[in-house]
Amino acid sequence: MEKLFKLKEKNTNIRTELVAGLTTFLAMAYILGVNPAILGEAGMDGHSVFMATAISAGIASIVMGVMANYPVALAPGMGVNALFTYTVCFAMHFTWQAALAAVFISGVIFLLISVTGIRKMIINAIPKQLKLAIGAGIGFFIAFVGLKNAGIIIANESTFVALGDFTEPQVLLSLVGILITLALLCLKVPAAVFVGMVITALMGIACGILWHFEGMPVLPETYIALDFQMDTVGSFFSGFSELFASPGTAFVAIFSFLFVDFFDTAGTLVAVANRTGMVDENGDLENVEKALLADSIGTVVGSVLGTSTVTSFVESTSGVEVGGRTGLSAITTGILFFVSVLFSPLVLATVTNAVTAPALVVVGVLMAQQLGGIDWDNLVSAASGFVTIIVMILGYSISNGIALGFITYALTMTASGKVKNVNPIIWALVVIFILYFAFLV
């Protein structure tokens, strides 16, 4: 264990890593229910997608842990699954088989540019101040996701967003869970985020049993799943002919998957690296090339099994906050995803939005502390950081926030007379981002 994961060097131990892996799994477990629902709208079999989601997450997370020693777990990403269904299948009129073919091709391209080191060069070219803004912005983003999923923040025609109904049982459970988790953190309780989730789930189950509140976590009638059929395995093969029957549209679909996965992953790795001290004095991420390769392998495996793009999950930061520092926590999460195949009824019944919301909100608070590292007296850092964060939240997109942050950085550096200090890779990305917003968004 010590030789493989360098536990002493990372100032951690096996118990802490196991708890961190479990915490990350619980924070990510919602994807096991959400992903089949979203891809099911495209005509895919829900049970098969559940199986593909769990197995691909398990494989990718273990590969990340063993290969890169990063405390980052992977699964089919939120946002990109919506891109799969609502854009590629609905708007572009591709079948889900063709959409899986596009995901497979994007994964192969990722694999190639990861092996050649291009992805590493791009991530290391991101200015340190912008990396801090990306990490903080993701914190605000996942907190917003947690608040929205819990019903604490809702849509409003007049004010765009508003507070939800605090008399709703699910909303109250989430609010109480957030307060309990914050209190546990203030009391310096070990694994406070994980303990807060467990307490929230138990309170919800009790409220459902005693007062019959709707929408509460429940104990399932059966705990073991016996159906392991997967009709989606290898279905991407039949989608190639349809996909390339429209080369222009196929390019847009493939590039869209590439764009979203690349920068969602970049943002997640930057955020985790900043929180775990895996960034050197130059702002470069430690061992990032292996982490990127593991992410690419996950996407390829996921498309073969029958799910949308597998990507590094920002919820991994929940495990980081309880002490996860090595790949052992990612491996633990991966194993739990495999186990969830057996206990899918229990996972889907007890891990609700009300249970995950406290973890997401509190982790968001902790990640937002990176704002303190931004030089707000420097207009370049302040403007690019602000745009990155505000677009992530209001645009509900990590990748779009990063893109506009890059554009703002290049513009303000030029206006400040520091154009020679801008990395050529940044300029290349700015051109790509502008074309992306001009033609694809």
Image (tube, grey):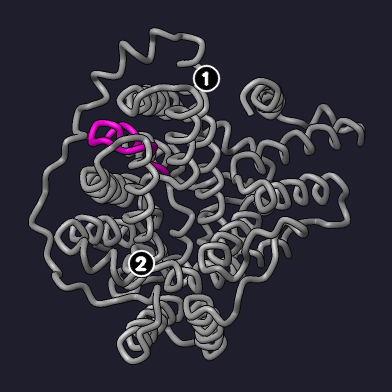
**Mark 1 crowdedness (10 Å alpha carbons): few <14, some 14-19, many ≥20:** some
Q: Amino acid at mark 1?
A: Val
Q: Nearer the viewer, residue 107 or 417?
A: 107
Q: Residue at x 58, y 32 (%)?
A: 122
- Rendering quarter of residue 96: top left
Magenta-drawn stretch contains 72: no
Q: Nearer the viewer, residue 286 or 30?
A: 30
| Residue 258 horizontal/vertical position (percent) | 48, 29
Q: Residue at x 13, y 70 (%)?
A: 222
- Rendering quarter of residue 124: top right
Residue 35 in view, yes or no? yes
Q: Quadrant of the C terminus?
A: top right
Residue 66 in view, yes or no? no
Q: Residue at x 53, y 76 (%)?
A: 171
Residue under numbered circle 1: 252
Residue under numbered circle 2: 26
For the residue labelled by badge 2, is the local secondary structure a helix, a strand or a loop?
Answer: helix
Q: Nearer the viewer, residue 130 or 22?
A: 22
Q: Nearer the viewer, residue 342 or 293?
A: 342
Decide which of tag 2 and tag 1 comes sooner along the chain. Answer: 2
Q: Which mark is residue 235?
A: none
Q: Amino acid at mark 2?
A: Leu
| Residue 216 horizontal/vertical position (percent) | 38, 76
Up/down of 61 relative to 308, above or below:
below
- Between marks 2 and 1 in the image, the one whose residue lies nearer the viewer: 1
Q: Quadrant of the N terminus?
A: bottom left
Q: Residue at x 38, y 53 (%)?
A: 34
| Residue 66 horizontal/vertical position (percent) | 28, 49
Magenta-highlighted residues: 299-311
Q: Are marks 2 and 1 in contact (CB under 8 Å)?
A: no
